[in-house]
């Protein structure tokens, strides 16, 4: 048996499908591509696929990952081409590689996500002032925000300090009354902080007039770390 790690996109209309629908879509694409999948044992066998951290509905991405187990060795270019033929517009496998059998799963190693967030300004603000507000925002040791529990969690909404989950936040561009923010946030084993929570806190505490109803979020990449250095899961 062999394991392949693949990096793929989730853009255009595909950003609106749920994680469960994504799993089903990928399973179907692999079957139609005649990839020799390994199935789990038991009463309800299913393909051995492991996905990285789930993406919120409505968020696009060019840096999603999955691990798949297959029975026979196949050429990676052939694997990519065959699966891409079966994927809908907005989804494409960009890279893939074979993993060592003892390698940890993609779900276990993810620690950070990077994003570009497009947000309209409710009124014009000089670029220098926005940068100053962001720097002051990041200088705080404590940035409190409300975190909603998961759907399966019966806990009430709670207030948490999100500062420790923000690795990077900077103004990427400022044009036509719209800002683009680049951020690297804790994900997976380090906790999970969504970009929506960051821009809400930024609008509230840094007093930047962001129109939160008109925001677009795009995930650039997922990261793991090795010897303190951030790297992609397919490096």
Image: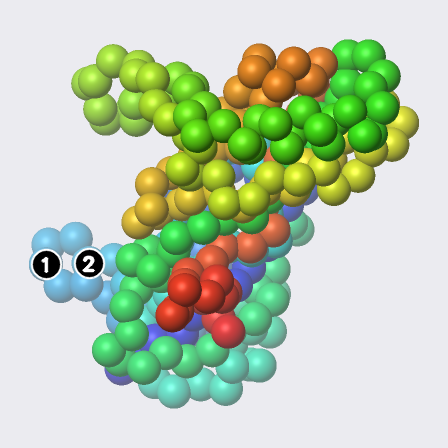
Residue closest to the far left: 42
Image quadrant occupied by the N terminus: bottom left
Question: From what the image shows, is residue 168 above or below residue 4?
Answer: above
Q: Which mark is residue 45?
A: 2
The image's mark for residue 26 is: none
What kind of element bears circle 1? loop
The total of numbered circles placed on residues is 2
Q: In this view, does 112 lie above or below 233?
A: above
Q: Quadrant of residue 63?
A: bottom right
On the question of residue 184 being in view, the answer is yes
* Res. 47 image quadrant: bottom left
Left or right, 170 with reference to 108: right
**Rendered location of residue 118, percent (x, y):** 71, 32
The residue at 44%/85% (across/down) is 74
Q: Residue visible at 74% across and 26% down?
A: 130
Q: Mark 1 points at which residue?
A: 42
Q: 214 or 192, which is in the foreground?
A: 192
Near-viewer residue (101 or 177): 177
Please name the colour scheme applied to the rendered image: rainbow
Residue 98 pos. (x, y %): 41, 80
Is mark 1 in CB contact (under 8 Å) with mark 2? yes
Instruction: Describe the element under mark 2 as helix, strand or loop.
Output: loop
């Amino acid at each position: 048996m062999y394991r392949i790690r693949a990096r793929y996109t989730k853009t255009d209309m595909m950003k609106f499908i749920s994680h469960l629908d994504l799993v089903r879509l990928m399973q179907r694409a692999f079957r139609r591509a005649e990839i020799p999948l390994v199935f789990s044992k038991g009463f309800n066998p299913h393909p051995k696929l492991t996905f990285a951290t789930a993406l919120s509905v409505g968020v696009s991405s060019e840096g999603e990952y999955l691990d798949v187990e297959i029975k026979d060795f196949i050429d990676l270019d052939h694997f990519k081409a065959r699966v891409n033929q079966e994927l809908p517009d907005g989804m494409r496998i960009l890279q893939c590689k074979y993993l060592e059998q003892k390698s940890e799963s993609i779900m276990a190693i993810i620690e950070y996500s990077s994003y570009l967030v497009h947000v309209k300004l409710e009124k014009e603000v000089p670029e220098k002032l926005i940068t100053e507000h962001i720097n002051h925002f990041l200088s705080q040791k404590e940035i409190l925000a409300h975190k909603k529990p998961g759907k399966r969690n019966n806990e009430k909404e709670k207030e948490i300090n999100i500062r420790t989950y923000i690795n990077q936040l900077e103004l990427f561009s400022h044009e036509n009354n719209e800002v683009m923010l680049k951020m690297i946030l804790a994900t997976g084993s380090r906790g999970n902080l969504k970009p929506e929570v960051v821009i809400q806190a930024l609008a509230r505490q840094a007093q930047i007039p962001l129109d939160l109803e008109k925001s677009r979020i795009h995930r650039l990449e997922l990261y793991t770390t090795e010897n303190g250095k951030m790297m992609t899961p397919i490096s």
